[in-house]
């Protein structure tokens, strides 16, 4: 009988194995049966030995003794077979158990080696820690990429190894509290994404932490490169949009400048054409006034020398109302003189405002430009059916002449003052202002800067739109009333052309204050 240890631990017993297992017991039962039969016959012979024939009894007894010897030999063989069977059964069972244990150990060893091989070659780092933060496992293909080798980190505390990365310590603490956590680890130029989970035993008792670290350096580089590319594309788009806005604004300003230039030429032409006849009138009113006075004096002298004229003269005196003419004619001539002076002043203001002959920077009187602008806007300052007179309060300081573009700076004054008048008319229309005022102040700062403040006591500008005041095409006025270019152009003239400052300070129900600062 050969014993083959290479059997399958899961296969069923063979017929030979079953026979060997039960054969000792069958022999034992057979031996006991034979012994019982022999002993029964022995008892019978013993009883019958009392018979007279002694020879017969002796022969029977001898035969029984022989049978007993055979029985004893059979029983010995049976017992030997039984002992052999028991020994064989026990040996087989022990050998089988040993073989199973050896096979299971080998299987577990193979599985462990397979698992370790997988973990060692996997593109991750698998690590475990106990409740004290001591590393009990640190395996993976990327272990050599970290700042610590395997033999240097096992048995060490995470609180000592990675004390410079508090996010890892916090993730470990979170896992020990029973929560899943995630943190980014940095090892030189390498970036790892780590995930932490609690290790639980019976009754969900936490006995450690298990974690996985994945190398995301390349992915992070791609993300960074993508973000950089997006930022560059966004920056280029912003620059293109800014360029487009600047082109649009420049185009609009050129169009506006062309219109203003045409308007200036028209104003200058009208002023020139009006100036000649008005100068003629103004130059002749004074002698006409003297002639009239002389004629009236002559009429008075005639009345004194000839108090009783003829009937025809008396009728003519009554017809022309000589007394009224004598009293009113000097007043008419004086009014004509005032009117011609006013027209001359207005023509002068128009020429001063347009300043077509002053395209270059030159020293000018700032107050003259402000006064000219106010004179042009005078018709909007007067009392109207829906608005009382808008008072203009001037607080002029003693200023030197300022090197500037006079025509462009007057345009700034015009835009700001016109907006102030619009705001005051709106506040009056809404019943929130009964005494509309515009205050114009000038001041010299450090003998290097001139400051002009133009304030109104209107409704003010909401905070949420103050940052947009100088944006091109931004306006709060109804369609058709405002283009949104006035303050934008003004900002460009003050800041870009004159290297100055243009600021706005406003509060709801507190009015608006524009401050212009330009170097002298």
Image (spheres, rainbow, N blue to C red):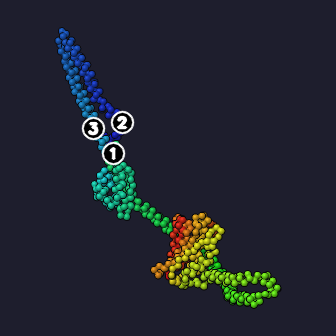
Which residue carries the number 3 mark? 94
Closer to the camera in the image, 125 or 162 = 162
The furthest residue to the right:
312
- Helix, strand or loop under label 2: loop
Position of residue 185 relative to residue 363, above or below, is: above
Query: Is residue 416 at all visible to an observer of this figure?
Result: no
Q: Position of residue 248 (x, y in %)?
A: 58, 72
Which residue carries the number 1 mark? 205
Residue 6 is left or right of residue 59, and the answer is: right
Which residue carries the number 2 mark? 12
Q: Quadrant of residue 186?
A: bottom left
Q: Position of residue 401 (x, y in %)?
A: 52, 84
Task: Give the Cα distance between marks 3 and 2.
Answer: 17 Å
The furthest residue to the front:
308
Position of residue 437 relative to residue 54, above or below, is: below
| Mark nearer the N terminus (3 vs 2) | 2
In what quadrant of the picture does the N terminus appear? Answer: top left
Q: Position of residue 472 (x, y in %)?
A: 57, 71
- Helix, strand or loop under label 1: loop
- Helix, strand or loop under label 3: helix
- The residue drawn where x is 29% and y is 27% is 26
Of tags 2 and 1, the one toward the viewer is 1
Task: Give the Cα distance between marks 2 and 1.
Answer: 42 Å
Of tags 1 and 3, the one toward the viewer is 1
Q: Position of residue 322 (x, y in %)?
A: 75, 83
Label 2 CA crowd tier, 10 Å (few <14, some 14–19, many 20+): few
Closer to the camera in the image, 381 or 506 = 381
- The residue drawn where x is 54% and y is 65% is 509
Query: Is residue 294 at all visible to an observer of this figure?
Result: yes
């Amino acid at each position: 009988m050969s014993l083959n240890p290479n059997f399958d631990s899961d296969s069923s017993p063979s017929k030979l194995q079953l026979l060997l297992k039960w054969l000792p017991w069958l022999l034992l039962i057979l031996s006991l049966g034979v012994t019982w039969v022999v002993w029964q016959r022995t008892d019978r012979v013993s009883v019958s030995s009392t018979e007279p024939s002694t020879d017969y009894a002796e022969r029977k007894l001898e035969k029984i003794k022989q049978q007993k010897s055979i029985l004893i030999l059979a029983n010995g063989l049976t017992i030997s077979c039984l002992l052999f069977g028991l020994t064989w059964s026990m040996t087989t069972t022990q050998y089988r158990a040993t073989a199973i244990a050896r096979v299971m150990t080998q299987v577990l060893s193979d599985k462990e080696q397979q698992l370790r091989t997988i973990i060692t070659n996997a593109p991750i780092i698998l690590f475990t820690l106990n409740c004290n933060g001591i590393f009990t496992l640190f395996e993976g293909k990327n272990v050599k990429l970290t700042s610590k080798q395997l033999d240097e980190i096992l048995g060490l505390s995470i609180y000592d190894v990675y004390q410079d990365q508090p996010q890892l310590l916090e993730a470990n603490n979170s896992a020990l509290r029973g929560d899943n956590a995630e943190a980014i680890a940095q090892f030189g130029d390498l970036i790892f994404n780590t995930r932490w989970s609690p290790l639980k035993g019976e009754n969900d008792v936490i006995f450690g932490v298990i974690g996985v670290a994945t190398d995301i350096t390349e992915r992070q580089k791609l993300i960074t490169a993508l973000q950089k590319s997006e930022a560059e594309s966004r920056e280029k788009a912003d620059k293109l949009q800014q360029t487009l806005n600047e082109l649009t604004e420049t185009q609009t300003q050129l169009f506006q400048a062309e219109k203003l230039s045409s308007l200036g030429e028209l104003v200058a032409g009208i002023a020139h054409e009006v100036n000649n006849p008005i100068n003629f009138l103004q130059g002749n009113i004074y002698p006409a006034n003297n002639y009239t006075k002389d004629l009236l004096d002559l009429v008075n002298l005639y009345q004194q020398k000839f108090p009783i004229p003829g009937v025809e003269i008396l009728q003519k005196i009554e017809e022309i109302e000589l007394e009224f003419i004598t009293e009113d004619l000097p007043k008419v001539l004086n009014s004509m003189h005032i009117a011609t002076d006013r027209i001359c002043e207005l023509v002068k203001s128009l020429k001063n405002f347009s300043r077509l002959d002053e395209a270059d920077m030159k020293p000018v009187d700032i107050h003259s430009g402000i006064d000219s602008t106010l004179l042009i806007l005078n018709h909007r300052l007067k009392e109207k059916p829906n608005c009382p007179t808008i008072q203009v309060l001037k607080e002029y300081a003693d200023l030197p002449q300022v090197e500037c573009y006079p025509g462009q700076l007057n345009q700034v004054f015009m835009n700001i003052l016109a907006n102030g008048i619009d705001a005051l008319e709106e506040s009056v229309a809404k019943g929130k202002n009964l005494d509309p005022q515009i205050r114009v102040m000038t001041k010299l700062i450090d003998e290097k800067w001139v400051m002009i403040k133009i304030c109104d006591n209107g409704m003010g500008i909401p905070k949420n739109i103050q940052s947009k005041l100088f944006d091109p095409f931004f306006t709060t006025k109804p369609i058709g009333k405002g283009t949104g270019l006035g303050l934008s152009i003004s900002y460009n003239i003050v800041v870009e052309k004159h290297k100055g400052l243009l600021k706005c300070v406003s509060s709801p129900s507190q009015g608006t204050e524009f401050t212009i600062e330009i170097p002298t």
